[in-house]
Amino acid sequence: MASVRVAVRVRPLSQREKDRSAKTIIQIDGHTTTLFKKKDICLSGEPSGKLGKSFRFDFSYDSMDITNPNCVTQDKVFEDLGIEVLQAAFEGYNASVFAYGQTGSGKSYTMMGSPSNYGLTPRISGGLFDHIDGESQKGKTSFQMEIRERFPLESHRGGRTDCSVLMRRPLWQLDSSDGYSLSRHKVQSFTQVNQLLLEGNSRRATAFTAMNHVSSRSHAIFTIHFKKAMFDAELPSETVSKVHLIDLAGSERADASTTAGMRLKEGANINRSLVTLGIIISSLADLSVCSGMRKPSFIPYRDSVLTWLLKDSLGGNSKTIMIATISPADVNYSETLSTLRFANRAKNIVNKPTVNEDCNVKIIRELRAEIGCLKALLSVGSLVS
Ligand SMILES: Nc1ncnc2c1ncn2[C@@H]1O[C@H](COP(=O)(O)OP(=O)(O)OP(=O)(O)O)[C@@H](O)[C@H]1O
């Protein structure tokens, strides 16, 4: 059993927020993130009293001032979270990282970053290849890596098709006619992965340029299938891990003054899949927290493709990390509060990660260990008598 690990990251004020004379209403202290109302911020910019709403997370990252030596960098996020994912993959566990937050709050920055300042996805891919290079030189282990990229085009025929598509065809057969962009590649070097990431990002952006959008208007799911073959207890053995790295579309408010027509409809579809995600997170959190409570009869993963893809990551066989990204500005108070509440519920989800290995090899290894113990007991017994 393993709880979903949750991190919150707050970015610097954007130029647009500065132009609107926005005030910083977030304070980070150790693991705790506190959100204040604008009226509780003094002229000095400091919050007055203890009036804010506080949330405690596994990690609360202050990236508000890049000139501050304590500003949480991409390196630090990778050290805390990325290394954990690499460890899980090497040991044969599934792992997932997903970034959730309002549009423009820093999801892509944290997950993808830029060529001069990589985010988690390229760093984790690079880390896997570093491991492969190190282990391959010892000559006892072989590896295979395959990348699958999926971009559920939420605008396609409306979100309602999600469910029916899943009933008709398995996920790996979905294509652009189902509102999907899906690609699958065997990779042998970090350069190849990086190329795929760049191509994938431009495809994702292009899809929406055609529709007059600038921000990422779809979820991006980058999955690494990592296979490790070795000899264990003189038997050939294999572990297979799936690492999902997910940059969700923005969870913005469908505000009629800034959003209209097709964009509003698309926003509503994105929000629908995020609402389903919210329902699932709430149901799983209730399930874990209130053991005495009547259990929900089922978790509606199939209500959206997004949640169906995340089935293992949420409440299933995976070590999962959620990164909630927020803006520090007062103008985003309600979105930030809703992101913090969402993240706070996700903390309560308990997953059941197990090593994905050939069960025959596992049984033989356990039986051999038991025989070893019995032999040791017998020899102690014969010494005593
Ligand atoms: N931690 C950070 N440090 C510095 N700049 C940041 C940080 N996080 C985000 N930014 C900047 O904020 C802007 C918005 O970030 P980003 O594009 O990652 O948002 P997003 O949540 O992915 O948005 P969308 O949902 O629209 O895709 C970018 O210019 C990015 O460089």
Image (cartoon, grey):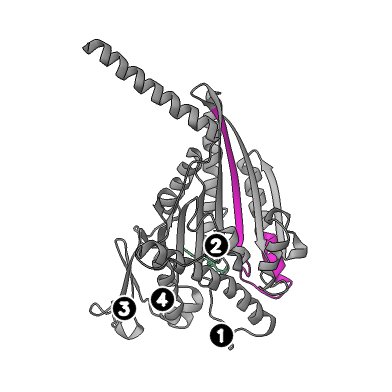
Which quadrant holds the C terminus? Answer: top left
Q: Categorize mark 2 by other alpha carbons within 10 Å: few (<14), some (14-19), many (20+).
A: many
Which element carries disc 4, helix, strand or loop?
A: helix
Q: Which mark is residue 152?
A: none
Mark 1 touches mark 4? (CB < 8 Å):
no
Q: Is mark 2 within 8 Å of ligand 1?
A: yes
Relative image position of residue 1 (x, y in whole percent): 40, 50
Question: Compared with residue 116, is residue 206 higher up or lower down, i.e. above or below?
Answer: below
Q: Please state which amino acid type lies under the numbered disc 1.
A: Asp
Sooner in the amino-acid sequence: mark 4 or mark 3:
3
| Span highlighted in magenta in the image | 201-230
- Residue 219 lies within the magenta run: yes
Q: Which mark is residue 108?
A: 2
Q: Is residue 68 left or right of residue 274?
A: left
Q: Earlier in the sequence, mark 1 or mark 2?
A: 2
Q: Nearer the viewer, residue 275 or 77?
A: 275
Q: Is residue 264 visible?
A: yes
Return the x and y of residue 216 as percentages of the image width and height.
61, 68
Q: Which mark is residue 45?
A: 3
Image: 240 above or below 254? above
Q: In the rendered image, which residue does mark 1 sit on? A: 255
